[in-house]
Amino acid sequence: MRQQYKQLLTIPKPFVKWAGGKRQLIPILNDNLPKSMGTYYEPFLGGGALLFHILSERNGQKCGVSDLNSDLVLTYTTIRDKANDLIHSLKNHSKNYQKDSKSYYYAIRESNPRSAVEKTSRLLFLNRTCFNGLYRVNSKGKFNVPLGKYTNPNIVNEENIRSVSHVLQSSKVSIKCRDFESVLNDAKKGDLVYFDPPYQPVSDTANFTSYTHKSFTITDLKRLANLCLDLDSKGCKVLLSNSDSQEVAEMFTDKQWKIKKIEANRSINSNSKKRTGHFELLIKNY
Ligand SMILES: C[S@@+](CC[C@H](N)C(=O)[O-])C[C@H]1O[C@@H](n2cnc3c(N)ncnc32)[C@H](O)[C@@H]1O
């Protein structure tokens, strides 16, 4: 009973480290949320930093979240539906990793489990133990990150998994695997749609677009800008994060768009000196 009480008090947090994750920007994003909203939509879910913030601040908030990465979406639904089995499997990974981290890491990286629990457990294990905690796949969709240098990685974050599972079990949160444009069929007047797409590279060396086997191209960015206009004409509230580039700013010149330049630290960059002094844009229509 006491254990259950304690679990319910744990605030759910992102359970994966994800490139472009917004945990450090939550205070700024929170200041830019509207006072009221219908359903909250997040069509580029990733680690879900803003989703978990909203779920812990706004009790009973209706949410519709999605992502094109099917492994990631499976991770959300498995945590929701099979938390006990998942924790058991992660404990096994943790034990084996402690015996011989290098050979165990590469054996798991090469493995291709079939069940939802083992697939999810593999993704979470690799995310905790790989270099920089970076999820990256090649054009064939194969995870290709080398082993990281950790002495004691927290492979089984049991309390957080239980807390996330609890909050996602609410019938008010729907989780889907789909392209971002499908949100147009669901969102209605007064709903908030937060877009945090893969960013266009600001320099040749800053190219990170491989969350899925398909890169996010300039055509996708144009599709996104048109979608924002369509949602705006439906009366939806739109909030968009993107890179600080002229290309992006030029797509949002109509008077309803307010553009703010905000300072952001990139936590996933192999060169720690490049993790500061980086700006992004926050664009909204309300
Ligand atoms: C910048 S990340 C989102 C990070 C998230 N806000 C967080 O806090 O962790 C972008 C996400 O968009 C997803 N994505 C890429 N292309 C997509 C598409 N066409 N439709 C939907 N999601 C897509 C990627 O799988 C990735 O998870």
Image (spheres, helix red, strand yellow):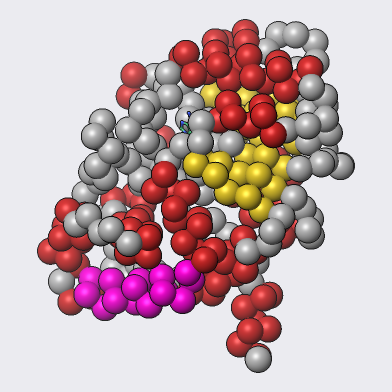
Q: In this view, does 33 lie to the left or right of 147?
A: right
Name the quadrant of the N terminus.
bottom right
- Was residue 92 drawn as part of the magenta stretch in this picture? yes
Name the quadrant of the C terminus.
top right
Tell which of 43 and 30 is nearer to you. Answer: 43
Q: Main secondary structure of the magenta part?
A: helix
Tell which of 67 and 280 is nearer to you. Answer: 67
Placement of 209 over or under 151, stated as above or below: above
Q: In this view, does 132 lie to the left or right of 195?
A: left
Give the total number of marks visible in the rendering: 0
- Was residue 264 drawn as part of the magenta stretch in this picture? no
Tell which of 93 and 114 is nearer to you. Answer: 114
Placement of 214 over or under 230, stated as above or below: below
Residue 19 image position (x, y, % from top left): 44, 41
Which residue shows up at 75% across the image and 36% down it?
192
Residue 152 shows in this picture: yes
Residue 261 image position (x, y, % from top left): 66, 25
Q: Which residue lies furthest to the left in this view?
A: 103
Magenta span: 82-97
Quadrant of res 233: top right
Residue 260 shows in this picture: no
Placement of 62 over or under 211, stated as above or below: below
Q: Residue furthest bottom?
A: 1
Quadrant of res 37: top right
Residue 88 image position (x, y, % from top left): 38, 77
Which residue shows up at 75% across the image and 8% down it?
254
Tell which of 91 and 183 is nearer to you. Answer: 183
Placement of 134 over or under 32, stated as above or below: below
Which residue shows up at 55% across the image and 13% down it?
222
Which residue shows up at 43% across the image and 24% down it?
216
Q: Is residue 209 left or right of residue 67?
A: left
